[in-house]
Image: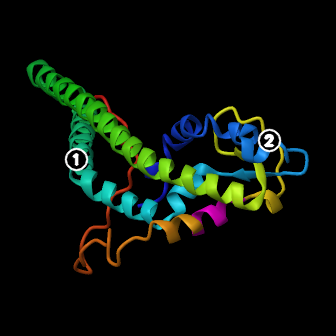
Amino acid sequence: MNSRFIVRRAALAAACILSTGAAWAQSPATAGSAASGKVGVISIRQAIVTTAEGKVASAELQSQFASRQNEIENLNKQISDLQQRLQAGQNKLSQEEEARLRQQGQRLTQRLDRMNTEYQEDVNAAQADVIDRIGRKMVDVLDRYSRENGYVVVLDSSAQNTPILFASTQIDVTQDIVRLYDQAYPVKAGAGTPPAKPAASKPAPTTSQPPASKP
């Protein structure tokens, strides 16, 4: 799975998790040295999905929702096929047959809409759980790193409405935090690795939500 699957709501979640991040500069340990302290930048979105745990979580989520996505894609194809039948049958189908096909299409479309809504809600909830789990531990790693390296403020460049217009790569601590996170929370060997599949098996579907085609 690509990282977009787990990142969709990461910016909002990370912004909530790090909403008190600026308070580090006000802590007793650093307030006195604020004038000489360092300022850093981190992309929490990138950090979460780059960790070994984030990659494993992405693979697990894809596996968890793959069957439901296939159902949605199959239903979407049925609607598309029905639409083509109606288009090809213009001026050829009887009024009764055309009405029957249109009613069938409406029922399938309503079902697809419900499935899409439920699917997206469940995906968002699962993603939020993963982001919260990793994000909270990452904040602890970042807090410790900041104190040990003299940072008085670390800003999240991936947060919504970020005030950052420019940041030098020299103050970006994203990769350092990913490395320290992986050291602190190592992933067991083989975790998240899907079972081997035959060479002719169908590739895993993408996680983008299929659009609802309406006849």
Q: Which residues are the magenta region?
A: 173-179
- Residue in view at x 20 percent, y 23 percent: 106
Question: Is residue 63 located in the magenta-colored stretch of the structure?
Answer: no
- Residue in view at x 23 percent, y 34 percent: 115
Q: Nearer the viewer, residue 71 or 170?
A: 170
Q: Which residue is mark 1?
A: 68
Give x and y (percent) for residue 207: 38, 51
| Farthest-out residue, right | 35
Give x and y (percent) for residue 143: 63, 52
Q: Are marks 1 and 2 in contact (CB under 8 Å)?
A: no
Amino acid type, residue under disc 1 in the picture? Arg
- Residue in view at x 25 percent, y 44 percent: 77
Q: Is residue 178 left or right of residue 39?
A: left
Q: Nearer the viewer, residue 69 or 177?
A: 177
Asked if residue 200 shows in the view, the reply is yes
Per the model, the C-alpha gap separating discs 1 and 2 is 52 Å
For disc 2, the neighbor class at 10 Å (few under 14, some 14 to 19, many from 20) is: some
**Residue 161 falls in image quadrant:** top right
Q: Which residue is mark 2?
A: 31
